[in-house]
Amino acid sequence: MKKLISLVTIISLLSLTACGKDDDTAHDWPWDDPEEEQTPEEEGEANPDIVKAGWTNVDDTFGDLPDYLHVYKSPATLQGKNAIAYIAVADLSKGRKFDVLGDIVYCDDKNVANYGATSLNTPAQFYTSSKAPIVVNGGLFFSAKKTDGSAFYVSQSLSARNGKLLSPNQAYYVPDWSNPVYYYPTIGAFCQKADGTCEATWTYTTSEATYCYSSPAENFKDKTPLQRPSATFPTTGVGFSATNAIGGVGVLLKGGTIKNTWAQEMLGVSADSNQPRTAIGYTSDKKLILFVCEGRGMTEGVAGLTTEDEAKVLSSLGCVEALNLDGGGSSCMLINGKETIKPSDGKERSVLTAVRIY
């Protein structure tokens, strides 16, 4: 009798299974293997490793995005600190490029012999003029006066667009103008080459050429200045040939290794304190990552990150090349014109350059 009941039970289960084969999601079979569930990649997530690292895809927050671009919000902590950060991830294998926004010109005014512009723009203004789906602030700058009293905003950072060098990195640093001692630092730049790949490098512009170096000149404020960079110092210089490029302060990653060379580059970015930050990075699978984090207490308890923190975060996201851009009150990321973090000035700061992906 027991054998008959067992046989009937098995037949009944087989019948139920056959009848319900078009809707077997309606049953929670105890023998289902949980490992057979779809992974984020199978469900259509373009960057599953970033999601596994604790970042949340927030594409839907920012409206329609092109298929090569995705946006993620950070977990509640980064490097053990309260954090609000966002990254935009663009697939460069689909032929995409980054571009530098901003009208940089050369000024040969007697008091200002440098590269820059007569006006600034907020990231929102850059978005309005470009309609780029992603805009972040770019390189460093400072305000000066022309001999006629009008303003001129001097670029401290290299920029290049469509193969043309618009401005070089700052050529020297003087710690104390009352007793001037000149240092000649090699400063970071992030470059996209003609083949679409990207790299971080250190640059210096001489009267002959702009050179890129595989490592920086080891200048430090408490040491005697090193010689002026050349075609052979600090390493063999390679002539600058990037299609598009942006400068900043602090090569964060080079060849997959954390560098964080803000001290050698000798421009102040409060690298060892927690601050709002902006960075640009590149992964081994040809993804461009734009990073921004909030700071200075705009959200209670969120102070920001150091550049070392920033380098470690970008490394954890798969970046092998990365550069720290201007930060502090300048840090801002817009997705389809919508702010991600709260700018630490309480509003968007007007800046000389911005970076977009197109």
Image (cartoon, helix red, strand yellow):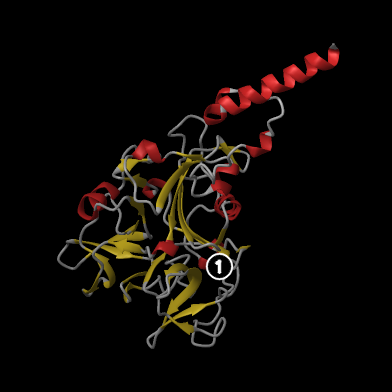
Horizontal arrangement in the rendering, residue 182 relative to residue 145 (left or right):
right
Residue 38 pos. (x, y %)? 58, 39
The residue positioned 17% from the left and 61% from the top of the image is 150
**Quadrant of the drawing holding the N terminus:** top right
Q: Is residue 182 something one can see in this rendering?
A: no
Horizontal arrangement in the rendering, residue 109 relative to residue 261 (left or right):
left
Horizontal arrangement in the rendering, residue 227 relative to residue 177 (left or right):
right
Q: Amino acid at mark 1?
A: Gln
Horizontal arrangement in the rendering, residue 332 relative to residue 201 (left or right):
left
Please, which residue is most extreme toward the top here? 1
The residue positioned 45% from the left and 32% from the top of the image is 299
Up the image or down, 229 lies above or below 33; here it is: below
**Quadrant of the drawing holding the C terminus:** bottom left
43 or 301: nearer the eye? 43
Residue 321 pos. (x, y %)? 53, 64
The residue positioned 43% from the left and 73% from the top of the image is 172
Q: Which residue is mark 1?
A: 264
Up the image or down, 204 lies above or below 347; here it is: below
Neighbor class of circle 1 (other Cα within 10 Å; few <14, some 14-19, many 20+) is: many
Residue 227 pos. (x, y %)? 53, 82
196 or 177: nearer the eye? 196
Q: Secondary structure at mark 1?
A: helix
